[in-house]
Every structure is written in structure tokens, then in C-alpha cells.
Image (tube, rainbow, N blue to C red):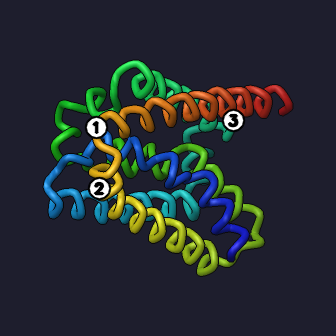
Amino acid sequence: MLEYAFLFFLVIDPFGNLPFVLALVGERPRPLYRRIILRETLLAFGVLALFAFTGDRVLGYLHVERASLVVAGGVILFMISLMMIFRSASEMFEDDYAEDPLLFPIAVPSLAGPSAITAVMVVRSQGNATPAGLLAALALVLAFTCVLFLFGQHLHRWLGRRGMNAVEKLMGLLLNLVAVDMMLRGVRAFLST
């Protein structure tokens, strides 16, 4: 279970997602912030669990290859990273999502993004993980993510607006690299089949 938890930790990347979450909802009142974080991590768990057990069937029904899922996820993350670098993640979602984002963009695609969805589908399809072990690994990683995000507001106060802007720009650059790498891996996977 721990090896799957480590894999899920890497693909969900709670530390990399923290600046994005804080930029989007970090200035909300504490009770609303707490409610958003708890709800979004639970929704991310639900989405990942759903794809772990039904993802291959859904992709097969839609005739979508895993390589397409990885490329599409890379494109979405690339667009988000450009906004984080040149503007702000909070400006990107300042319409209906900025006040109280439901499912999008925190639960999906930030936490339950294409790489996390692909990872749970691959772990499940390999048959090495029991359903209970897979769910326990997911729960462990998302519980840690939730706790980190809940303390993130204190970090936001400590760093201040300029500090968080700097962290967001840096994370945007790193997310940009991850997005390009995802697209290249998807293209490579497609060409090798």
C-alpha cells in the first residue's frame, strides 16, 4: 500500500498544488475556506476512486486511448500554468468558481488530474493492488493533502501577498514543465502503439 501511496503522492503533488489553491481561495473567511478544502478533497477522492474501478470501461466505451488522456491533461495544465505565470490563478477563475469552487478547478483537475487518474487506473489494471489497499493509499494521500491545505492559510498570512505571488509564479513554471512533459509522454505512448 505504501508504494501506491508514494506514487499517488507524486502525481497528486499536494505541495505543488498548494499555491494554486491559496491563490484561488486563500483569502476566503476561515470557515468557508475549511469547508471548500474538505469538500474538494473528498470530491477528488470520489473521482479517483470512480476512475480506479470504472476508468478503463469509460475510456473503452468512448474509444479514448490513455495517451490521449495524458496529452489532454498536459494541455489543460499548460494553460493553467501560463495563467499562473503571467496573471494569477485566482484571476483565471474569478467568475463563478472564485467565490466557492465546486469540483472544478481544485478537485478536478488540480488534485484528480489526468496524471492521477491515469495512475489509479494503471495500478488497478495491473491487478497487484487490492481494492481496499488502493482506496487506503488514496485516502492516506488525500488526507495529508487536506491537512496541508488547511494549514495553508496560515502560510498565506506568513508569506503575505507578494510572497504568495512569488511562490505561485515559481509553481507555475514548474507546472509548465510538468505539463510539457505530460504531453511529450502522451505523444511518445501514442507513437509506440
Q: CA distance from mark 2 to mark 1?
A: 12 Å
Tell which of 19 and 69 is nearer to you: 19
* Category of crowding for the residue at label 2, using alpha-carbon neighbours closer than 10 angstroms: few (below 14), some (14–19), many (at least 20): many
Q: Is residue 181 above or below residue 124?
A: above
Residue 156 left/right relative to 128:
left
Which quarter of the rendered picture does the C terminus lie within?
top right
Residue 181 left/right relative to 155:
right
Pointer 3: what residue?
67
Helix, strand or loop for disc 3: helix
Q: Indicate the position of residue 138 as horizontal and vertical percent values.
A: 55, 68
Helix, strand or loop for disc 2: helix
Pointer 1: what residue?
161
* Category of crowding for the residue at label 1, using alpha-carbon neighbours closer than 10 angstroms: few (below 14), some (14–19), many (at least 20): few
Q: Tell me which amino acid carries mark 3.
A: Ala
Can residue 46 be seen? Answer: no
Q: Tell me which amino acid carries mark 1.
A: Arg
- Which-is-in-front pick, marks 2 and 3? 2
The quadrant where residue 184 appears:
top right
Mark 2 or mark 1: whose residue is earlier in sequence: 2
Q: Indicate the position of residue 33 as horizontal and vertical percent values.
A: 22, 57
Q: CA distance from mark 2 to mark 3?
A: 36 Å
Tell which of 173 and 136 is nearer to you: 173
Helix, strand or loop for disc 1: helix
Can residue 155 be seen? Answer: yes
Mark 2 or mark 3: whose residue is earlier in sequence: 3
Task: Identify the residue shown where x is 57% and y is 64%.
Answer: 53
Q: Indicate the position of residue 91 as horizontal and vertical percent values.
A: 26, 27
The disc label shown at residue 153, or none: 2
Task: Identify the residue shown where x is 75% and y is 69%.
Answer: 127
Q: Indicate the position of residue 176 as horizontal and vertical percent values.
A: 57, 28
Q: Are marks 2 and 3 in contact (CB under 8 Å)?
A: no
The quadrant where residue 104 appears:
top left
